[in-house]
Image (cartoon, grey):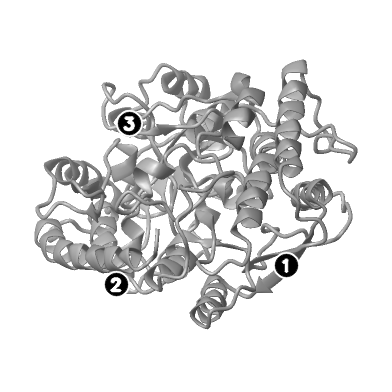
Amino acid sequence: MIKKVMILILAVLMIFPLFASCVKDDGNKPGGGTGETDTSPVSGFETSGQEEAERDAITAYVKDVAENVDFAGKVFTFIGKDEEPGNFPKKEQETGIIEEDAVYFRQRDVEEYFGIDIEYVRTENGEITADQVINEVTAGGTSYDLVCGSIQTTGQMLLNSSVIRQVDDLDYVDLDREWWVPALREDYSIGGRLFFLTGPIVVHNYEDTTCILFNKKVTEMFGISDGDIYRTVKEGKWTIDEMIRTASAIPENPDGTGTWRYVDPAGYAWIFAAGLKITQFDENGEPTVADALPIEISNLSDKLCPIFSDKSQTAGTNYKLEETAESVYGVESLDELFIDNKALFKFGYTYSAMDLRKYDVSFGIIPMPKATESQKDYCSYARMGMDSAVYIPRTVGNITMTDAITEALGALSRIYVKEAYYEKLLKGQSVFDLESREMIDIIMRTKVYDLIALYSGADYNQMGSFLQNLDDSFKIDNSNLTSGYKSNAKLCNFNAKQLVKAVNKIEG
């Protein structure tokens, strides 16, 4: 009943997600609140009337939730890795560092609106986070209200230990709101049940997405038009073939003294860029992979592997030969080649733009190319190894409080975290031109989510044999792609069944 009333407040803001080969996000700008607390937007931003209205509506929504509950004087315990800047404020006051202040403002508002205190349990890494929660829940303890950590590490450990609860059946968390990833129920459910929540509530939501960076000094040197690249993207014609054609303006570099067309090539991310998914779901909604190698993946590998494994075109390393950037190229990192204007295209994630902005290198950012022009959208993979989520322990002491506070944190992240990370850092400080800002909107609008890293056959924090075989087939060698896929698919599907067994132990 509460949700039905609240829906009226933000009806104008509702997003109707479109599901095609990729999942669309809305990409709208966030705002800040207008309550008794100073919820002005992050420093350095001018806001339009529409953005002010959005901030007001979100703040009103959160206050409405707070007015329907009574948690005054209670302590809400949030556990996770103490990363920089992470989901926990570094200081209990403004610091002038926008990413830190964004998290501080969010937590400050929640504490004021609900009359609670948020207590932070900070751990060294995701495995320690999971171990502490597993030990607590297994012993019947109720110390933790909300957990944050990488899906591939923390999430996988918690799920396999059956210590977290379902999150798509809560009264306050509303997955149709724009602060939750629209793809969650479609791509992250297991047996029709969802255990992960992600969106701007976790800062990695803006750092984990695949993209391509191109070096503007190199385009100038070889007569490649930056404007043509951007225009091709906006016209929907940025394809693998177009990328290859553009790169062909640079001569091959067999002796390594010239310029490379590509550096640090992506691996299995090309599968998602082509609008494909690895995980399938059976009639019961349980994850699985195809027993035989899909022809689309085989064809994609046949096109790209000869390019990315050719050192006259691509600067990359072969871990099977124990190659390192130092041993092959005389640099500590392959990024140095791009920074030193010795490579046209660099493959990476959106955080790469933030990192490279620290150096004296001029670059543009564009989405991964489509497989063909007929592909509906550009598709950018949200890498599960980086992508984080929040989880609710199965033995949480006050589920109503956790439910309401989690929704409030998600909503206020729409105001503060998105503005700081997406608008100010990613679109503001990490790129040089307005065209790249448009490209970032395209990239973030079409993120692809896939559960595959949870059952690829890896120990925590590792890729797993199934994904490793696919990764190798795009940038090292694809001679055993078919045989490797078949044998690894058996292990992958066995692991998926074990994951389902763990999920089935969780009471719904």
Give the distance between the C-alpha atoms of the residues marked 2 and 1, in whole angstroms: 44 Å
Q: Are marks 3 and 2 in contact (CB under 8 Å)?
A: no
- Binning the other alpha carbons within 10 Å of mark 3 as few (below 14), some (14 to 19) or many (20 upward) gives many
In terms of secondary structure, where does tag 2 sit?
Answer: helix
Sequence order check: which comes first, mark 3 or mark 2? 2
Q: Where residue 121 sits: x, y (%)?
A: 69, 71
What residue type is disc 3 on?
Answer: Lys
**Which image quarter is the N terminus in?**
top right
**For residue 289, side relative to residue 157 (left or right):** left
Q: Where residue 224 sits: x, y (%)?
A: 46, 26
Q: Which residue position is annotated with label 3? A: 370
- Of labels 1 and 3, the one closer to you: 1
Task: Determine the residue positioned at 68% across, 34% down.
Answer: 423
- Of labels 2 and 1, the one closer to you: 1
Q: Which residue position is annotated with label 2? A: 321
What residue type is disc 2 on?
Answer: Leu
Residue 438: tell me if it is visible: yes
Q: Are marks 2 and 1 in contact (CB under 8 Å)?
A: no
**Which image quarter is the C terminus in?**
bottom left
The residue sitting at the front extreme is 1
Give the distance between the C-alpha atoms of the residues marked 3 and 2, in whole angstroms: 31 Å
Q: From the viewer's perspective, is residue 304 above or below residue 437?
A: below
Residue 120 — which label? 1
Task: Determine the residue positioned at 82% across, 51% down.
Answer: 108
Residue 360: tell me if it is visible: no
Which of the two residues, 142 or 102, is positioned nearer the viewer here? Answer: 142
- The answer to which quarter of the image holds residue 318 is bottom left
In terms of secondary structure, where does tag 1 sit?
Answer: strand
Give the distance between the C-alpha atoms of the residues marked 1 and 3, in whole angstroms: 43 Å
What residue type is disc 1 on?
Answer: Tyr
Q: Where residue 421 sits: x, y (%)?
A: 67, 43
- Of labels 3 and 2, the one closer to you: 3
